[in-house]
Image (cartoon, rainbow, N blue to C red):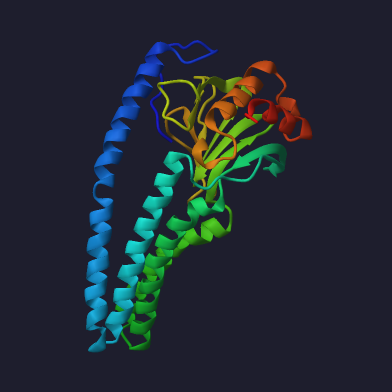
Amino acid sequence: MIGTPPSRGADPNGPSRPDAADRAELNRRLDSQARDARRLEVPVACVIATLGLLVVAGGTAHPALLTVGAWLLALSAVILWGRSTRNRVERGTGPRGPSPRLTLLDGEPATAITAPALRLAGTLTLWLLLALPLLGGGLTLLLGGAIGAGVLLAGAGAFWLVPVALTAAGRICAGGVWLTPSAVVVRDHGLESRIVWSGLATVAGGEDPSVRQGVVLLRASATAGGIHRRRSRPWPISVQTAGPSIAVIDARWLSVDAPALAGAIRHYQRSGTASELGSPASLRTLERFTPS
């Protein structure tokens, strides 16, 4: 979630000028930070791959080095694959999620527009790359009699398996938006944001120049209360998480693009027809906003 709570009143039918200026400044800073980080991606991956090749070359004398070298090469490959996928998404040629579908969310009918499972593939692979060598090393030490070091190493590996288990349990997901008769629910990996329709103040996206391309921003009113909760923790997820009253939908991964999604959410915000969500009528409504 990214954003700052507004300090001034806003038009309920659209973002106010101060909000638009704040978002534009935030986008500028985020873009600058992203460019700085991306300059290092290829050099870092190349350094890791070179080190991996050097370690593999020494594996003829020490076979255990083959495993370390292969791990380094796999890590560099995951970094480059993740970079390639992200760049494709930003160009609009990346993988997209399935078509809108009807489902249940916490027992309530919902119209779901979700990201593809591939969005989590790189993150899951990194978690496994961190966990498995630590677990393997810990077990090796335990079998060799080094109890203390073995437990410490295996525990570190188990720590990185926790998010893998949470993903398998559905607590961490690729993300998307679920439109229910009572609320609009946004999930992005382990963070969930729920805004009831009566508490949805503004919907920005699509043609709004102050919003990043491919993104839809939903801002809750001051009376909506806490809207965020963490699902990526091993403890119960009912506890509210403090944060700005803005939910961010990255529509670049979804089958419905940002202008159409913003238009549909704005329609349900204003029309009072949210009761149809979770029914076939909602799919027909979404089709009206989606370019043919």
Picture coordinates of residue 10, whole percent (x, y): 47, 12
Q: Nearer the viewer, residue 249 or 292?
A: 292
The residue sitting at the front extreme is: 292
Residue visible at 37% across and 73% down in the picture? 133
Picture coordinates of residue 100, whole percent (x, y): 66, 39
Picture coordinates of residue 261, whole percent (x, y): 58, 29
Q: How many marks?
A: 0
Tell whether 112 sits left or right of 211: right
Quadrant location of the N terminus in the rendered image: top left
From this viewpoint, is residue 56 visible?
Answer: yes
Task: Classify residue 140 by image quadrant.
Answer: bottom left
Q: Nearer the viewer, residue 88 or 58?
A: 88
Tell whether 125 sits left or right of 116: left
Picture coordinates of residue 254, whole percent (x, y): 56, 40
Residue visible at 40% across and 12% down in the picture? 17
Quadrant location of the C terminus in the rendered image: top right
Q: Nearer the viewer, residue 266 or 198?
A: 266
Vertical relation: 66 (above or below) 266: below
Residue visible at 49% across and 61% down in the picture? 164
Q: Nearer the viewer, residue 224 or 189?
A: 189
